[in-house]
């Protein structure tokens, strides 16, 4: 382990480490365990734990469609159809045939400049809206003479606290992103073909992308006017397609357009145009919406599935929604209220409130800090819960999936023996063009070669990523691999036999 900590590239890093025996709580190694460290996305362990406790592993989002007006004997709704957003982060997108949510190790929210399209999950991003359209049609509605509206007033629109989509909304279709998928031409010099997903007439797209003989893909997609998307760049010739994403400007209007198109595909005649903005001013008061007749409803997979996507791929926009969902569960609508409730939950799990600090749910705020001891305390508290298996199953597995898929070599002895959340945060120093790694972190559970279960929290803060002695410039990936080596060191170097299981505790008086 000393060789890992003495790595010359990271010799000036500020290290925080705490490793304890998961059964006994015995400390095996610690370094600056009571100092606050920038968590980066390890913050998601805390926000997801709070939401897990508040909502429960089996919580399902139920998104209704209600009507304002009567349906006549010919199936005409003489009034409005209203989709009432309930904060479902996926709305049917990512759902596989078995009902589980799908993920790719590198999620599309991180696509920038052109990433291989194989990282798009193979599912229908419109599945939830299609389900609602089918139920509207089955309810006997053949024509909508009034408006189609999306009620996205569940909570305040809030900035995301990480890379990817910039805002969190109560309505999210395809993460409120348009995926621009570019396929190279058959030969260099030919134009590449571009399409968008989800497919819709909501956007007008002007694509001019060249097919090059070789090189890295370079794709830029940007809005050049209201709902007008310009796509430029070049992609190398070959069988691989590439994806760039662009965030929609108005999630409610986006969802409204897609819902109208889904209704029309089901044969429901909709007078309203999908090209119009969502007329939020036409919505009745929220209290009145709750009393309107329901004509359709979409029910999501259980919350444990969303947790798996959030932690496996470090999904920033879904994680940023967690404090908002916690707030809503207590009748509140603001980020501040959600974070206050998160703090209460963490205290209830035994954490010292002075050992943690958070400004959002995803880990991208400067306020996001925790001590290694508080991080281990959280992990041990979650491990003591009867529903721990769902929380544990959501974590990336070292060398196998999610953000830990490439943290160790395929032949690493520790591969598959750690389940932990990663974190990465850096800034660019504009003075001399170098990069400062503000945090690289890893926290979770692992077992040693001797079978001893451990709880780990590793933090590296404050590293200048620059070439030393004429060598190659280190990267954030190098920092990740260093933490992978630390896992290998604890896996191989434990030595003592695992402690025996403690005797079962007597039930408390009056308990079960």
Image (cartoon, grey):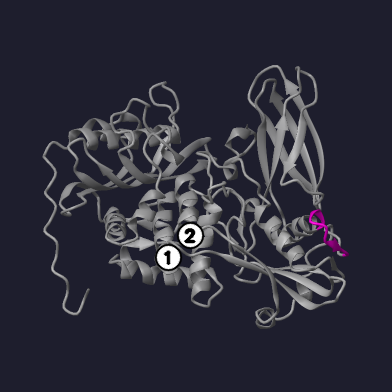
Would you say 15 lies left or right of 268 here? left
Residue lying furthest front:
73
Residue 205: tell me if it is visible: yes
Quarter residue 406 falls in: top left
Residue highlighted by disc 2: 303
> Is 270 part of what is drawn in magenta?
yes
Q: Work out how far the residue at label 2 is from the one at label 1, CA to CA, in angstroms.
A: 7 Å
As for residue 440 lying within the magenta part, the answer is no
Callout 2–callout 1 Cβ contact below 8 Å? yes
Which of the numbered marks, if any, corresponds to residue 43?
none
Please tell me whether mark 1 sits on a helix, a strand or a loop. loop
**Where's residue 366, x and y in %?**
46, 55
Q: Which residue is mark 1?
A: 56
Write the residue at 86% across / 64% down.
272
Span shown in magenta: 264-271
Quadrant location, the C terminus: bottom left
Residue drawn at (49%, 61%), measured in percent from left and top?
Answer: 360
Identify whether 118 is placed above or below 316.
Answer: above
Q: Is residue 34 above or below residue 281?
A: above
Residue 259, image quadrant: bottom right
At x 85% / y 63%, what residue is drawn? 270
Vertical position of residue 169 compared to residue 101: above or below: below
Closer to the chain start, of discs 2 and 1, is 1
Quarter holding the N terminus is: top left
Left or right: where does residue 452 sit relative to residue 77?
left
Q: Residues within 10 Å of mark 1 (few under 14, many from 20)?
A: some
Neighbor class of circle 2 (other Cα within 10 Å; few <14, some 14-19, many 20+) is some
- Say which element carries label 2: helix
Position in image of residue 253 (x %, y %)? 75, 61
Position of 172 with respect to 282 (left or right) is left
Where 211 falls versus 281 (above or below)? above
């Amino acid at each position: 382990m000393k060789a890992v900590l003495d790595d010359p590239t990271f010799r000036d890093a500020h290290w925080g480490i705490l490793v304890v025996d998961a059964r006994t709580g015995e400390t095996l190694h610690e370094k600056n365990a009571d100092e606050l460290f920038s968590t980066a996305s390890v913050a998601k362990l805390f926000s997801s734990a709070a939401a897990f406790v508040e909502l429960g592993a089996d919580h399902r989002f139920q998104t209704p469609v209600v009507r304002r007006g009567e349906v006549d004997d010919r199936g005409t709704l003489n009034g409005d159809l209203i989709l009432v957003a309930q904060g479902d982060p996926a709305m049917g997108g990512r759902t596989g045939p078995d009902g589980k949510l799908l993920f790719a190790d590198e999620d599309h929210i991180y696509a920038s400049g052109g990433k291989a399209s194989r990282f798009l999950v193979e599912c229908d991003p419109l599945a939830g809206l299609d389900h609602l359209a089918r139920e509207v049609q089955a309810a006997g509605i053949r024509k909508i003479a009034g408006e189609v509206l999306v009620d996205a007033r569940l909570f305040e629109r809030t900035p995301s606290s990480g890379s990817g989509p910039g805002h969190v909304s109560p309505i999210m279709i395809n993460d409120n992103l348009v995926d621009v998928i570019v396929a190279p031409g058959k030969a260099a010099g030919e134009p590449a073909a571009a399409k968008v997903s989800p497919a819709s007439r909501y956007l007008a797209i002007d694509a001019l992308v060249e097919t090059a003989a070789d090189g890295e893909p370079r794709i830029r997609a940007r809005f050049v006017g209201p709902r007008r998307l310009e796509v430029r760049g070049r992609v190398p010739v070959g069988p691989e397609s590439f994806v760039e994403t662009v965030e929609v400007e108005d999630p409610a209007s986006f969802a409204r357009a897609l819902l109208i198109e889904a209704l029309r595909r089901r044969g429901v005649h909709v007078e309203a145009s999908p090209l119009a903005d969502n007329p939020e001013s036409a919505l009745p008061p929220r209290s009145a919406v709750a009393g309107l007749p329901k004509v359709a409803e979409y029910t999501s997979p259980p919350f444990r599935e969303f947790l798996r996507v959030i932690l496996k791929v470090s999904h920033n926009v879904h994680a940023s929604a967690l404090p908002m969902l916690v707030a809503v569960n207590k009748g509140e609508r603001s980020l501040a209220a959600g974070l206050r409730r998160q703090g209460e939950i963490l205290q209830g799990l035994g954490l010292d409130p002075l050992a943690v600090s958070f400004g959002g749910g995803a880990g991208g705020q400067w306020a996001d800090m925790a001590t290694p001891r508080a991080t281990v305390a959280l992990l041990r508290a979650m491990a003591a819960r009867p529903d721990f298996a769902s929380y544990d199953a959501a974590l990336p597995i070292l060398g196998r999936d999610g953000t830990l898929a490439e943290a160790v070599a395929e032949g690493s002895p520790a591969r598959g023996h750690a389940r932990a959340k990663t974190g990465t945060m850096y800034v660019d120093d504009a003075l001399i063009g170098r990069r400062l790694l503000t945090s690289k972190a890893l926290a979770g559970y692992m077992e040693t070669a001797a079978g001893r279960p451990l709880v780990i929290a590793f933090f590296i803060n404050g590293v200048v990523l620059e070439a030393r002695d004429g060598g190659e410039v280190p990267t954030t990936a190098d920092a990740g691999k260093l933490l992978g080596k630390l896992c290998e060191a604890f896996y191989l170097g434990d030595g003592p036999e695992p402690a025996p299981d403690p005797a079962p505790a007597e039930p408390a008086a009056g308990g079960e």
